[in-house]
Image: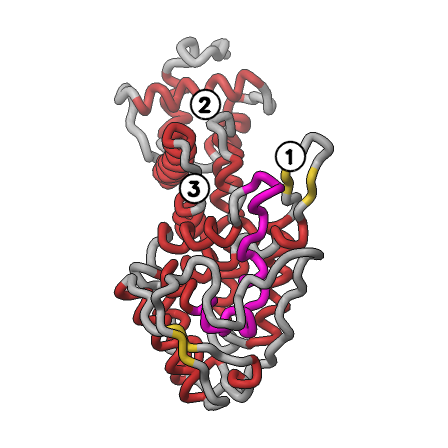
Amino acid sequence: MSDPSSKSTPPLELSDPAPREPGSSPRVARSGRPKGVASASPVEALPGARERVLEALDVAVASSETGEPGRLLLVRPEDLRGLGAVDLRPGLDRLLTGRHADVGLDVLLGSGILEVLLPEVEAMVGFGDGEWRHKDVWKHTKQVVIQAVPRVELRWAALLHDIGKVKTRTISESGEVHFFGHAEVGARMFDKLERRLRLFNEEDTLRQEIRFLVLHHLRAGCYDGSWTDSAVRRFAREMGSHLDGLLLLSRADMTTKRPEKKRAAMRMIQELSERIEQLAVDDARVPPLPKGLGDHLMREFGIPPSRQLGSLMRALEMAADGGEIESHRDADYYVSVVAQDRARFGLVSG
């Protein structure tokens, strides 16, 4: 993938921070420390200079690599104006692919950069917790990020895969929490985010892959072992070149604290992956009989399209697989085989 620092992009269009739910408290305290960032971290206010914004990003990147929070530098919305993808993408990529990306993301949150730059992500902080009896989506997201293979497209998709949950949460009368359609909503939110920030403006392949993974991140998890071979083939065909990334993201998206549930889900993803591979091998195998043989047999022996023709073809395949006759020969060879032993292949001598 190309280096975004080699491209020239216009400044980012920053949005106002995401609106809060009624009665909720701010997730980033203006005193400088959000939930999840160590209280011992020194806090330093920033003047409105782009160099200091990049310094704050560098601190978050370092934290993602070392696992130590470091200094907490506060950034105001106006401090980011004039900065573009060429300034921010390299640091964000390094942060997300760091071994301790979860720590780096909390530092990015504490600095204020996350709220101004990616309010769709910041809106997940504390969301779904408490009275709704549902896991904190921000904590889940950070875990998915660090569980994902450290490839740029996978880590960005992990960060953004659940942004649609904020807009789709419903609570049933029995208290069950649902996020119907959150993958589709999340993909549309990604489109809007990209129009605003143009972070991937010069890397369309990367942009498309991230969007695809966000849109389809639930698909592999629907597999339960009952899919037919045709369904597995269709799934693999629809995922196309994104199949590997999707399966890797699906594995990373398993954050349940119940070991048996996690093992069962992992087994299903592994089984799906193995079935896809085996079917690809089977489908790539050259058929033992030539294409168009059925037409030759119908013409030579006056057989209409029927079960009889199907039985004849299967008998030839079994004979070829068993080594009784040669495989991968031309049609005339198999016509001759049948003609010499018509009774064996269910044909009345004429």
Q: Position of residue 165 (x, y in %)?
A: 61, 51
Callout 3 touching callout 2 (CB < 8 Å): no
Dividing the picture into quadrants, the one containing residue 285 is top left
The kind of residue tagged 2 is Met
The reply to whether residue 331 is visible in this rendering is: no
Callout 1 touching callout 3 (CB < 8 Å): no
Q: Earlier in the sequence, mark 1 or mark 3?
A: 1
Q: Is residue 265 left or right of residue 181?
A: left
Dividing the picture into quadrants, the one containing residue 17 is bottom right
Q: Which residue is mark 2?
A: 313
SS of the residue at dot 2? helix
Q: Which residue is mark 1?
A: 176
Q: Quick one: label 2, few (<14), some, or many (20+) residues within 10 Å?
A: some
Q: Of circles 3 and 2, which is in front?
A: 3
Name the residue located 63 percent from the left edge and 44 percent from the top edge.
179
In the rendered image of this protein, does residue 1 appear above or below residue 55?
A: above
SS of the residue at dot 1? loop
Q: Which residue is mark 3?
A: 254
Q: In 3D space, how far apart are the residues under numbered discs 3 and 2 (Cα atoms)?
A: 47 Å
Name the residue located 46 percent from the left edge and 32 percent from the top edge.
293
The kind of residue tagged 3 is Met
Range of magenta residues: 108-134
The kind of residue tagged 1 is Glu
